[in-house]
Amino acid sequence: MIGLISEGWRGMQGALRLMTFRSGGEAMFDVSVRGFWRSFAAVLFALPLAILVLLEREHLNLPINGLQYFLIYFGTWISFPIAAAVSVAIIGARHRYLAWVILHNWGVVWLYAIITAIWSLQVAGIINAEFRDFLFFIYGYLRILVHWRIAYVTLGVPTITSAFTAAVPALVSYIVLVAISQAFAVTPVAG
């Protein structure tokens, strides 16, 4: 367990270094098959942040269906490696698949930290709902840039190719979100 926590810390530090254009981040990842499977522990690293967001929304009287929220949470984590496998096959970068998924998994923890921080600022009374929405607007673009940067660093393909490649799992993730949301929005017709 301590080894996994240590690997997670190194992975998150490496992801932060790469996302902020600092050197040395690549060496902080175990890009083996073992490292691939262990990188899914990032789900557990981000889970307390996701729970905190749920509680913060409840505190702000903006509750959401917990089951729906966590189905989306886990659904997007599951959909990424599947969509990424298809993407690397299309662009001929199968040999970079493990690195992409590993870096993605640890990098996404930082995205959850940003989401949590935004909600925390509102709970603390530092920002209002309008400014929160503005920050989430900015976050939408930041999320795209982070996913592009991760794809660019790991896949070793040109900039535009990495951007389009990163867009595929992002689109699949959005489809998962919409599909689960729509499944919960369906109300039975009274007969």
Image (cartoon, grey):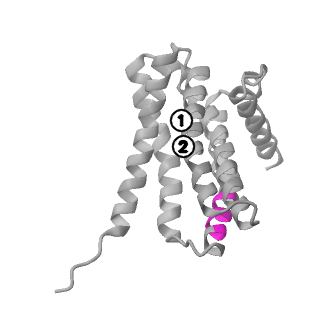
Q: Amino acid at mark 1?
A: Ile
Vertical comparison of 188 with 84: above or below? below
Outermost residue, left direction? 191
Q: Would you say 157 lies left or right of 102 here? A: left
Residue 140 disc label: 2
| In-front residue for pair 93/50 | 50
Q: Residue at x 74, y 38 (%)?
A: 12
Q: Quadrant of residue 63?
A: bottom right
Query: Any magenta on residue 54?
Result: yes
Q: Residue at x 60, y 33 (%)?
A: 146
How far is the residue under mark 1 from the one under mark 2?
A: 7 Å
Residue 57 disc label: none
- Considering the whole magenta stretch, tell me its main secondary structure: helix
Vertical comparison of 114 with 23: above or below? below
Q: Are marks 1 and 2 in contact (CB under 8 Å)?
A: yes
Residue 140: give x, y in percent of width and height.
54, 43
Residue extent of the magenta highlight: 49-56
Mark 1 surroundings within 10 Å by alpha-carbon count, few (fewer than 14), some (14 through 19), many (20 or more): some
Q: Is residue 93 visible?
A: no
Q: Residue at x 50, y 21 (%)?
A: 162
Vertical comparison of 57 with 20: above or below? below
Residue 188: give x, y in percent of width and height.
26, 78
Residue 139: give x, y in percent of width and height.
59, 44
Vertical comparison of 116 with 34: above or below? below
Count of numbered tags: 2
Q: Residue at x 82, y 41 (%)?
A: 6
Query: Any magenta on residue 129?
Result: no
Q: Would you say 162 lies left or right of 111 here? A: left
Residue 190: give x, y in percent of width and height.
21, 85
Q: Amino acid at mark 2?
A: Gly
Find disc 1 in the rendering and name its residue: 144
